[in-house]
Amino acid sequence: MFSAPVAPVTLPPPSPLRRSQRFWLLPLTVVLTMGILAYVWTHLSAPDVQETRIELVSVPEGAVVRVDGELIEGTTPLFLGEDISEGQRLTIEATLPNFQVWRRSFDVEPGHTRHIAVFVPIRVDITIDSIPPGAQIDVGGERLGRAPVTLRGAPLGRVLDVRATKRGHATATRRVTVSGDETALVVELPGLPERL
């Protein structure tokens, strides 16, 4: 094995700080020290004060909100923060047409709290009959059976396409919107014209 002699490397001595460099060193050290002390003072010695805020989100959006019976301006999603404080007992009620009322009571906690109102549709049963009786009833392309039949759990506001068929009669169709006022529907089938 061959080895070449290695020459020692000598580094030049560090150059002394010039006068202009020394001039900035002291103020820079003072500013950094003061910044560190200010950070420690504000983050470690002061109590953590959190803003009390409540966010209300709904699915679907656009619900009208009342807090302790008082109507809140706007619709969901919205923030509540004014006039509420930690430990206060609140009742929030959110309403949306054709859906069940969403209501929660709780004690306000410090910080940001999110409540999500998931609305459940109001559902009704609809009885569908025919004139003459016994027509085949289809709703939205789904066969329900011979009239009278009951469509269970139809959500309010849903549009239904009802079709009734019976031998010897013309097919009858009706488009209806489910409401809480009408829970019975009668479809009249016209007779076919006589052939001569």
Image (cartoon, rainbow, N blue to C red):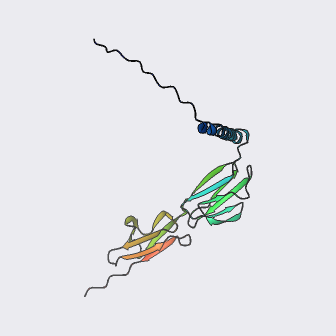
Q: Can you name the residue that lies furthest to the bottom here?
A: 196
Q: In which quarter of the image is residue 175?
A: bottom left
Q: Quadrant of residue 141?
A: bottom left
At horizontal 72% and vertical 60% (from top left) the residue drawn is 68
Question: Residue 86, image x and y in percent?
Answer: 73, 50
**Quarter in which the C terminus is drawn:** bottom left
Looking at the picture, tell me which residue is in the foreground, 195 or 17.
17
Q: Can you name the residue that lies furthest to the front here?
A: 19
For the image, the number of numbered tags is 0
Looking at the picture, tell me which residue is in the foreground, 125 or 147.
125
Looking at the picture, tell me which residue is in the foreground, 155 or 183.
155
Please say if 145 is above or below 90: below
At horizontal 28% and vertical 13% (from top left) the residue drawn is 2
Question: Residue 153, image x and y in percent?
Answer: 50, 62
Please say if 115 is above or below 124: above
At horizontal 41% and vertical 71% (from top left) the residue drawn is 161
Question: Residue 98, image x and y in percent?
Answer: 56, 66
**Quarter in which the N terminus is drawn:** top left
Question: Residue 6, image x and y in percent?
Answer: 36, 17
Q: Is residue 81 left or right of residue 150?
A: right
Please say if 54 is above or below 166: above
Looking at the picture, tell me which residue is in the foreground, 146 or 73.
73
Q: Can you name the residue that lies furthest to the left here?
A: 196
Q: Quadrant of residue 120?
A: bottom right
Q: Is residue 32 left or right of residue 159?
A: right
